[in-house]
Image (cartoon, helix red, strand yellow):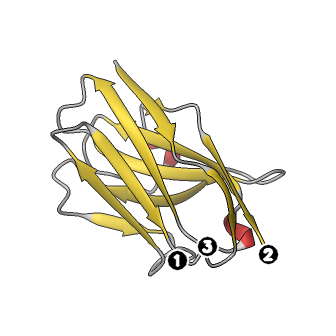
Amino acid sequence: QVQLVESGGGLVQAGGSLRLSCAASGRTFRTGMGWFRQAPGKEREFVAAMNWSGRSTRYADSVKGRFTISRDNAKNTVYLQMNSLKPEDTAVYYCAADREGGGSNLANLYDYWGQGTQVTVFA
C-alpha cells in the first residue's frame, strides 16, 4: 500500500507560481509518479509524470514549458512546480503512484491516489 498526501495548493493571480508537494508513505520503492487535475464539470486530465528513477518525464502539451515535475526519493516526495499560471489551470490537482514504475500519462495505470489539493488562478 502507498499513501499519498498533497499540499501546496492555493489561490494565485495569473502569471504567478505555486509548488505542489506529494508526500508518499508505504511501499514506495520504484513507483512512477504522476500529477493529474480535474476542473469543475470536466474529466480528470493528465498533467505530468515521472518514472521511478526520475530519468524520464512527460507533460501535457498545455503545461509544457510552464510546469516541472521532480522527485526527492530520499524524502519520498514528488513536486510539481507551476509557473506562469493561467486561469485555465484552475482545478483540483491529484498525485498518483504507479507500482510498475513507468510514470504513464494514463490515469487507469495508476494504483494509488491522493485526496487532491485545490489550485485556483484568478485573472
Residue beneath the point at 33% across and 51% down: 103
Location of the N terminus by quadrant is top left
Location of the C terminus by quadrant is bottom right
Q: Which residue is mark 3?
A: 85
Q: Nearer the viewer, residue 2 or 121?
A: 121
Q: Which residue is mark 1?
A: 61
Amino acid type for the residue under numbered disc 3:
Leu
Q: Is residue 102 left or right of residue 95?
A: left
C-alpha distance separating marks 1 and 3? 14 Å
Query: Residue 120: x percent and y percent?
Result: 72, 57
Amino acid type for the residue under numbered disc 2:
Ala
Query: Residue 39: x percent and y percent?
Result: 74, 54
C-alpha distance separating marks 2 and 1? 21 Å
In this view, the residue farthest toward the right is 41
Residue 84, located in which quarter of the rendered image?
A: bottom right
Which mark is on residue 123?
A: 2
C-alpha distance separating marks 3 and 2? 10 Å
Q: Give the answer, above or below, for where 19 lies relative to 77.
A: below
Amino acid type for the residue under numbered disc 1:
Asp
